[in-house]
Image: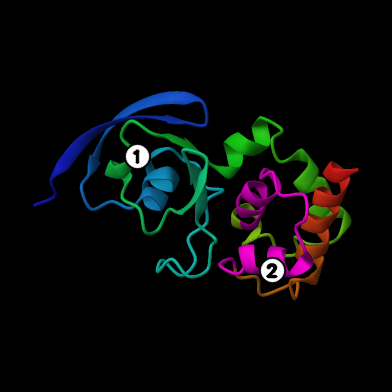
Amino acid sequence: MDFEVGIKAVVNGTTIQRRVKCRQHLGDFLREELELTGTHLGCEHGVCGACVVLVDGLVVRSCLMLAAQIDGRTVQTIEGMSDSNALRELQAAFANRNAAQCGFCTPGMLLTAHQLVSGNDKDVTRENIREFMSGNFCRCTGYEPIVDAIESVIQGRTQ
């Protein structure tokens, strides 16, 4: 028997109320129920980072979080962040540095990078970027273009 629970949350600026299955993962809920398919499901074990969304402004792996856990919280997906232009600098830097080749990992990369570049740390090194992004896998770029893109955004903000 699938038990359901009622949730009320803000997703990409819109308040939603739904009944969700208690065991439904957030990533599946976003993709299947809300048709927000920019959140990609890769490993479904919390390892690859393709399913990253922001919950209350923090990076969360939506394959590890249950949809029921967003009750009373704010969720931002790649669609909402892109529509609000919050990722404009990062998206341009990823395009300029060829950091988004096949694009499968890109939504998770952009949201994770957004959290990093939104911090107040002005002395972020390439090693810090690599460490912060280490939970996001990419099979196409070799990571250097991604690090270059993020570094360029950080340097642009400190000048």
**Which residue is at the front of the view, 36 or 99?**
99
Height in image: 130 above or below 2? Answer: below
Asked where in the image residue 61 lies, by quadrant, the reply is bottom left
**Which residue is at the front of the view, 79 or 55?**
55
Q: Which residues are magenta?
A: 109-136
Residue, x 37% and y 59% (percent of image)? 64
Q: Give the class, few, some or many, for how many residues have Cα within 10 Å of label 2's Cα (few <14, many ≥20).
A: some
Residue, x 83% and y 42% (percent of image)? 157
Q: Residue furthest right?
A: 159
Secondary structure category for the residue under label 1: helix
Residue, x 46% and y 38% (percent of image)? 56
Give the residue at mark 1.
70
Asked where in the image residue 149 lies, by quadrant, the reply is bottom right
Give the residue at mark 2.
130
- Disc 1 residue type? Ile
Height in image: 53 above or below 102? Answer: above
Image location of residue 95, percent across then percent down: 83, 53
